[in-house]
Image (spheres, rainbow, N blue to C red):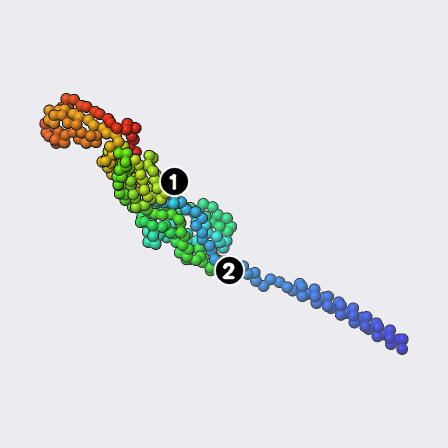
Amino acid sequence: MHQKIKIILCFFFFFTIITLFFSSTFAKYVIEDIFTIAKLDIDRCKPNIELIDITSSNHHYTNYANKTHTITGHIKITENHIVKNNMATSSIKVFVNNIFITPNFTKFFLVSQNATQKIYEFSFTHTTGDGALTLMIPEGIIEDKSGLVNDTKYFSTGIIIDNTPPNATFQEVVSSNHKSKAQITCNEAIRPLVGWEISSNSMMLSKEFSSYITYPLPITDFAENSSNVTIDIKNATNMILEYGTYDNFSNQTLVSGGKISSPATISSNSICKTESIFIRLTGDLTLQTRD
């Protein structure tokens, strides 16, 4: 009986050892038989294009420009697996007031790049039209290894293109002290002028005059377009300049400053020398300047 028990125990022990041995061997070969079948590089992000910045060469008013100014900006491409890159001046579509135009590109080059980004600088001039400046980059300019392409992008630049000179009207307003105020009303905002008051919306200029005077005044809008408005003060009598002349044709005359003593003297073919001249200044003698 004891002999049988010993045999059974020995058999059980031997079976356990064999089982553990084969289990360990099987596990070893399972681990060693694992190998890489394929390595996939999955890219689900489309190439991205951004307008980093843009400005004009218009001094003090960089958000306004006309066709004489140079507009400069930077475009950034974000993608680390580029297989097609057609970014060029022909890829930058320019619109003014939603109308497609063709400015003159003067500069386009790669400024910097790294593993994931490329930055280009561009410049163009001769931007025609009037209105808001918009840039567009078409779809499919950039393609990555996964076959994904960039979406169409529209960029609002914040720059106003203006190629039309300002239009202005003049009005003389007489005050009770025999002075006149010149008022200039414009159809758009204009730049300030030294010696003139300007309204909060930059569309009206005003200045007080003590005597009559006539001269052209240049005005300039934010985009550096210029035009002239005639200042014609006729009713200011706070200060009066009179002069008189005597010559062989007109004899003696006394006229106010800014007027010709005798138009006939100038239009005549005869040579009429002035024999004498008289000048008189009356009224408020505060120094007047013309701006």
Viewer can see residue 57: no
For numbered disc 2, what is the local secondary structure? loop
Which comes sooner in the sequence, label 2 or label 1? 2
What residue sits right under mark 1 in the picture?
60
**Label 1 Cα crowd, 10 Å radius (few <14 / some 14-19 / many 20+):** few
Whether 139 is drawn above or below 282: the answer is below
Residue 47 locus on image (x, y percent): 47, 56
Identified at 16% across, 22% down, the residue is 276
Mark sitting on residue 17: none
- Front-most of 255 and 102? 255
**What amino acid does circle 2 point to?**
Arg
State the residue lying farthest toward the top.
Answer: 275
**What amino acid does circle 1 point to?**
His
State the residue lying farthest toward the bottom.
Answer: 1
For numbered disc 1, what is the local secondary structure? loop
Residue 84 locus on image (x, y percent): 44, 55
Question: Residue 39 vs residue 76: left or right?
Answer: right
What residue sits right under mark 2 in the picture?
44
Residue 231 locus on image (x, y percent): 25, 37
- Front-most of 176 and 94? 176
- Front-most of 191 and 88? 191
Q: Quadrant of the N terminus?
A: bottom right
